[in-house]
Amino acid sequence: DSGVTQTPKHLITATGQRVTLRCSPRSGDLSVYWYQQSLDQGLQFLIQYYNGEERAKGNILERFSAQQFPDLHSELNLSSLELGDSALYFCASSAWTGGINEQFFGPGTRLTVL
Amino acid sequence: AQKVTQAQTEISVVEKEDVTLDCVYETRDTTYYLFWYKQPPSGELVFLIRRNSFDEQNEISGRYSWNFQKSTSSFNFTITASQVVDSAVYFCALGPSNTGKLIFGQGTTLQVKP
């Protein structure tokens, strides 16, 4: 158990809908990262937050947005969903903001868009 | 461009065999970090090791060992006396020092047969 929690574990929805994925980092970790894992793209970095502020952005679509709240939990919002958004979405956390620290991953949320 | 290549898509071995997973990376940074993660069939990503670019010492942890060679931009992972429980997808990742994101390879699926 990495100490990172993600809810829900599974999500099935329809095209055009909007969903919110939730992540609670390990106790004491200030950085939260979101990754998408799909068969064709592999594991791709989406976005990073550090202590409430956006710190780095990857290949995140404009339909996707995220935020980190004062209690350090984070939410990833996916809107106008398309079939291609079906993937496993991971949240990870680390103590600091730089690449020097290992990231601990949550169990993931499997999103299926029908 | 920063990139991680895991040329072996799938490897199948019989229990007790030694197996090496290859990882080659590309970066122009002088300071960076390298990681290995394991993704068992249950789906979570488990952190295995982190090395920084200034430390080329090989590391051994039980049946696992890692060989970092800066001259060939490689960070290979060897499992000695493989076991069925080692069956998983293994990911090599590059962590630039100035950002938090991890750049993952495509992963190597290891199947250990009894």
Image: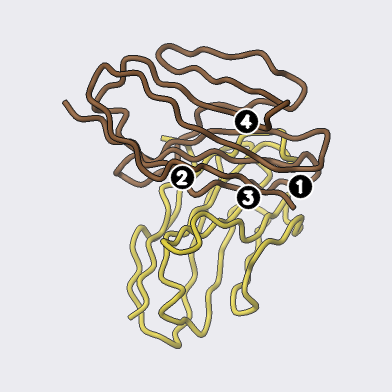
Chain colours: A yellow, B brown
Quadrant in which the C terminus of chain A appears: bottom left
State whether residue A49 is above or below residue B97.
below
Residue ID for mark 2:
B107
State whether residue B48 is above or below residue A47.
above
Q: Please identify the residue farthest to the left as the structure is shown.
A: B114
**Residue A26 or residue B111, whichever sits in front:** B111
Give, as a three-letter code, the residue at label 3: Val
Which image quadrant for residue B62? top left
Residue ID for mark 1:
B99
The residue at 35%/57% (across/down) is A9
Q: How far apart are marks 2 and 1 (CA)?
A: 22 Å
Give, as a three-letter code, the residue at label 1: Thr
Left or right of residue A59: residue A110 = left
Q: Is the residue marked by circle 3 packed among few (<14), some (14-19), or many (20+) residues within 10 Å?
A: many
Residue ID for mark 4:
B74
Residue ID for mark 3:
A32
Label 2: state its secondary structure.
loop
**Residue A77 or residue A90, whichever sits in front:** A90
Residue A90 % position (x, y): 49, 54
The residue at 48%/38% (across/down) is A3
Residue A14 % position (x, y): 36, 83
Q: Mark 3 lies on which chain?
A: A
Quadrant in which the N terminus of chain A appears: top left
**Residue B96 or residue A24, whichever sits in front:** B96
